[in-house]
Image: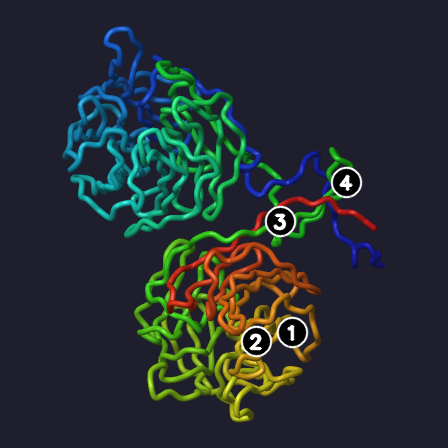
Amino acid sequence: MSKYKEIKGFKVQTLATDTAASGVFSATWASGGALPAALTESAGAGVTVNAALNFGGQGNPPSPLHPVSGETDSYNGTSWTEVAELNTARRLLAGAGTQTAALAYGGWPPNYVNTEEWNGSAWTNVADLNTAGRQATGVGVNAEACLMVAGKNRVSSVESWNGSSWSEIAEINTPREQTNNWGTSTSAVTAGGIDNPGAVIANVESWNGSAWTEIVDLNVGRSRAGTAGADNTEGLFFGGNTIAPALVATTEYFDGSSWTEVADLASAIAMEASAGHSAGNAFQIAGNTAPGTRLATTSEFVAPSAFSKINLGQVYFNSGSNAFKVTQQLAPAGTWSSGGDLNTARYRIGGAVNATQSAGLVFGGNGSPYGQTEEYNGTAWSTQPNSMIAGRYASYGGAGTQTACVTAGGYYPAGSPQYVTALSETYDGASWTEGNDLNEGRIDTATFGTSTAGVLAGGGEGSGGPNTVASVEIYNGSTWTASTNLPTVTQEMGSLGVSTAGLVFGGSVDSNPTTKNTTVEWNGTSWTAGGTYPISVKYLTGFGSSTLGIAAGGYKYPTAYSGVCNVYNGTSWTEVAELTTARLGTAGNGTSGAGFVAGGEISTGSVASTEEWNAPEANKTITVS
């Protein structure tokens, strides 16, 4: 006979400490083996803390005052062994690659263009850089495909190595020197550095293989730091100079969208070398703790192989604090930051409401070419080769994701003359296919759900109008079927959710100045009143769920573009951080924890900018009242 707790109960773990979002948050710095000689301004290579390489740098005085080194040392996870000498001794050089296949390039004095290739036992001179690379930094774990970024005199140049020669490629946006980088030749990050004499910056840029895009800044701007990471979605940034001669021990973790301080180095260090191709497996090598000093010490940052990972909604008992905890996404604490620009500025644009921040989709809109489709990878937008079958605007939404989305209605063609259409199209991640039409054509609708279970509600200029309608249609993957009407006629509203739990908010009664502040909730069969929206606004957008949703932007009559953002908790709305750029007619994709809005209209016309929304995760004590 089954017990009640086996049917209705669930297991609660007992833990000594709070859970962590990533192993990186549970990692600490520990001392590694000492180098044969004290150094600063050297370069490092290697994938893990068990197989690293250090070469070049500045040795100890007194003669000469700043002696350069060609020493090459290999690390086995416990101790360092001197294995060879560079052909050209130098300091302030760049390095890339692994313990057995590395590249050393640039350096000083003088300003070197020399490049040397390491085969695991000896260095060989190969093709020179195009521009001398003093105080430049290297990117790449593959010695046959790496980058050199910036350099002395605060430049923006970037060069790419293809295994035999260097070629100049797209420049970074902010010129700098003493920058710090990680990643590969096609997916990298450059962070911090100096952009004016004595002035450090927190600026960060992401590389996608063709262009650099400015993303969220470091919490602490600095130069000459250590880094580790595999690509532009995750990395570690540690130590460095703030305003000289101040040094820091600060370690920051990058998760692809934000920076979080984690365990600090034991001492404030700058001008160190570093290695590691993972944020959870980083190596700090040599450096200095004050001007004129050199270190032989190394430090290892290793995330534990076993840790308690945060899972949203996870409940556990913390025996240390004697309290029950639950992991939550703190949507009210979310913030907006700049993302990559659309390739075509436009407004009253369609978007896949349940796509994600790192796999987004927008289409159509009032901007030429009208049927253009763009996909977002979390950093940059790419225009897809196959446009919509019928380029249009004011279809104003899509049910689904980047690889499976349906949209219907809107103005077609988007030029002049134009007509209200009932046309329905589906996107499979590569191309659009025409499907069965809506029963009633209309524009400026609310759309949410998936490509096989979609909901389209209300809109303007439908046959039941002549202006605004209340009719609702359900999509099952092939046909649209009439369902329960909205409580009142509405168009130009925001929406979010899935086919059994959706939300429609704001909008207008017709295309005249009348705007609304109502919210209605959909349970799959009927509509009920929800919490009042804080402002009367139309042309707004939304993403997330009906119990934790985000709404942003819009238009407040008569002339006010809105940047207001609100979070819905299933009952009521709470105003949170505003958009940087107030706008109407944007496309929204994502979840309450990670989403974005793209495009839209401001007072001077269409915009291409994207703003990303990110909310922190945290463990909250459960209280009973």
Rendering coords of residue 217 (x, y %): 43, 43
Task: Report the residue marked by disc 4.
Answer: 323
Mark 2 nearby-residue class (10 Å; few <14, some 14–19, many ≥20): many
Which of the labelled discs sits on residue 507, or is there none?
2
From the viewer's perspective, is residue 558 above or below residue 92? below
CA separation in Å, label 3 and label 4: 18 Å
Q: Earlier in the sequence, mark 2 or mark 1?
A: 2
Q: Give the residue displayed 52% in from the left and 77% down from the top.
A: 492
The numbered mark at residue 518 is 1
Position of residue 117 measured from the top left corner of the image (x, y, whole percent): 21, 30
Q: How many marks?
A: 4
Q: Is residue 428 left or right of 25 when viewed as pictured? A: left
Say which quarter of the image contains residue 307: top right
Are the residues at dot 3 and dot 2 in contact (C-beta closer than 8 Å)? no
Q: What residue is shown at x 47% (from left), y 48% (from top)?
A: 257
Q: Nearer the viewer, residue 207 or 604?
A: 604
Mark 3 or 2, nearer chain start: 3
The circle on residue 337 is none
- Circle 3 SS class: loop
Of the two numbered discs 2 and 4 on the same chain, state the one appearing first in sequence: 4
Are the residues at dot 2 and dot 1 in contact (C-beta closer than 8 Å)?
Answer: yes
Q: Are marks 2 and 4 in contact (CB under 8 Å)?
A: no
Q: Which residue lies under the disc numbered 3?
A: 311
Real-space Cα separation, disc 3 to disc 2, in angstroms? 36 Å
Q: The disc labelled 3 sits on which kind of residue? A: Asn
On the question of residue 476 being in view, the answer is no
Crowding near the residue tagged with mark 3, few <14, some 14–19, many ≥20 C-alpha atoms within 10 Å: some
Say which amino acid is labelled 2.
Answer: Gly
Which is more foreground, mark 3 or mark 1?
1
